[in-house]
Image (cartoon, helix red, strand yellow):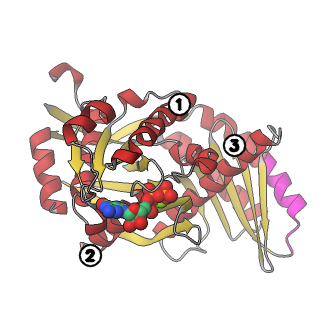
Amino acid sequence: MELDIVQYEIDREIKEGIDRIISNLFNKSSAELVLLTDDAGRIVCLCGDKLSNDYAAEFLASIISGVFGAALEMGKILSMEDLDILQYESKNMDVVIKFIPPRFLLGVLVRKGTSLGTVRLFLREASEELSSQMENLKFVPVKTIKMDVKTLEEKLNKLLGS
Amino acid sequence: MKLKLVYFGSSLAGKSTNVKTLYKILKEKNLVKGDMVVMETEEQRTLFMEFFISSINIEGFELELKILTTPGQFRLHPLRKVIMKGVDGLVFVVDSSKEREKINFLVMRETAAVLKEMGEDLMRFPVVVQYNKRDLPDAMDIEDMQVRFNPWATDYVPAVAVEGVGVLETFEKAIKNILVRKYARSALI
Ligand SMILES: Nc1nc2c(ncn2[C@@H]2O[C@H](COP(=O)(O)OP(=O)(O)OP(=O)(O)O)[C@@H](O)[C@H]2O)c(=O)[nH]1
Ligand SMILES: [Mg+2]
C-alpha cells in the first residue's frame, strides 16, 4: 500500500491577511504577545518576542485551548452559552483570550497599566476582521513524499528503535 | 505537520505512566521539545492533562506530535471532552485486570459518545489498543480482550508500562496508523 504523505499550509494570501490583522492588533494594544490558535491548540499566528523558544508558543497554545475549552464546559453547566472572553490578571501582566468563530482563539498578553477595556475593544475589532478570513481558510499542499507502509514502519523503527 | 495523539482509557489504567515513560525515552533520543506539562492531583491522578511535544523527522518531513492523556476519573468527564478536540489518533490503554473489564468497556463507549458530539466516529479513527498491566495475576487472556476491546481489529500491544515494556512500540504503531489512515491512497488498497 502506497502513501502520499502531504504537508499542508494555510493559503498564502489568507495567511498574509491574518498576519496583518494580528500585527495590527499587536501594535494598537501595545501587547507583549498576541497568539492565534485553533481550538485543538495548533498555532496559526504569533506576534511578539516575549517567548524564549518556539515550543514555548506551542505549549501556550495547548494550554490556552485547554483552559478555554474548560471554560466553555463550565459555561454549559452554568447556562453561560455566550461566554466568549476569558481574562487572567496578575501583578505585572494581564491576559485576555477571545473566541473567534468558528473554532479559533485569540490571546493577548499586555503589561499592567494597559486598559483592559481598550484591549477588549481592539480584540472585538480584530475578531470581526478575522472571522471572515477564518471562514475562507484554505490549506494548500506544499510538500509530498511517497512511501509504502513497510518502508514507513522501517523508518519509524530505525528512528525510535522499539 | 502537526499531529495530536491522545491516550485514553479507564481511570488508573496506566495512561500517565505510558506518557511519562515515553517522554523519558524520547528525551534520551533527543526527540522531544521542552518539558512535559503535568496537571495532577496530590495523589498523582491526572486532573486536567499531561502533554509534551515530540518532533520527528522522516525523510525531511517534520512531524510535530503533541502527546496528551485524558483524566480517567469520571468526575473529570467534561475535561476529557476538551482534550479530545481536534485529535488525529488515539491509544486505548486497557487495564488487563479482570476486575476492570466492565469499566474498560464503559470508557470505550463513552469516548465514542464524546467523539460523536464532535462529529467524529471512534470506529473510523486510527487507534492502537494497548493491553497494559500484563504483570497482574488476574490479567485476562489477550484473545478474550481482543474480542471485547478491539472492535477496530487494529494493532494491539501487550504492555507493562511501569517497566517500560510496550510503551515505545505502542507509540510507533500510533504514528504509523495516523499516517496510513490519513494518507493511504484509497485506490490502491
Ligand atoms: N502492575 C502494574 N501497575 C501499573 C502498570 N502501569 C501503571 N501501573 C500503576 O497503575 C497506577 C495508575 O497509573 P496511572 O498511569 O497514573 O493511571 P492513569 O490511567 O493515568 O490514571 P488517571 O489519571 O487517574 O486516569 C499507578 O500506581 C501505576 O504505577 C503496569 O503495567 N503494571
Ligand atoms: Mg493519569
Residue B113: assigned label: 1
Give the residues in magenta: A113-124
Crowding around mark 2 (Cα neighbors within 10 Å: few <14, some 14 to 19, many 20+) is few
Q: Which of the two marks, 1 or 3, is nearer to us in this view?
A: 1
- Look at label 2 and name its amino acid: Glu
Tell me if B56 is positioned left or right of B86 in this view. left
Tell me if A116 is positioned left or right of A68 in this view. right
Chain of the residue where label 3 is placed in the rendered structure:
A
Query: For residue A143, what is the image quadrant?
Result: top left
Residue A100: assigned label: 3
Count of labels in the image: 3
Quick check: is A116 in the magenta stretch? yes
- Look at label 3 and name its amino acid: Ile
Find disc 2 in the rendering and name its residue. Answer: B28
Q: Residue at x 29, y 48 (%)?
A: B130
Q: Are marks 1 and 2 on the same chain?
A: yes
Alpha carbons under labels 1 and 2: distance apart:
37 Å
Chain of the residue where label 1 is placed in the rendered structure:
B
The location of residue A141, given as percent across then percent down, is: 35, 38
Q: Tell me the element at label 1.
A: helix
Q: Which of the two marks, 3 or 2, is nearer to us in this view?
A: 2
Query: For residue B13, what is the image quadrant?
Result: bottom left
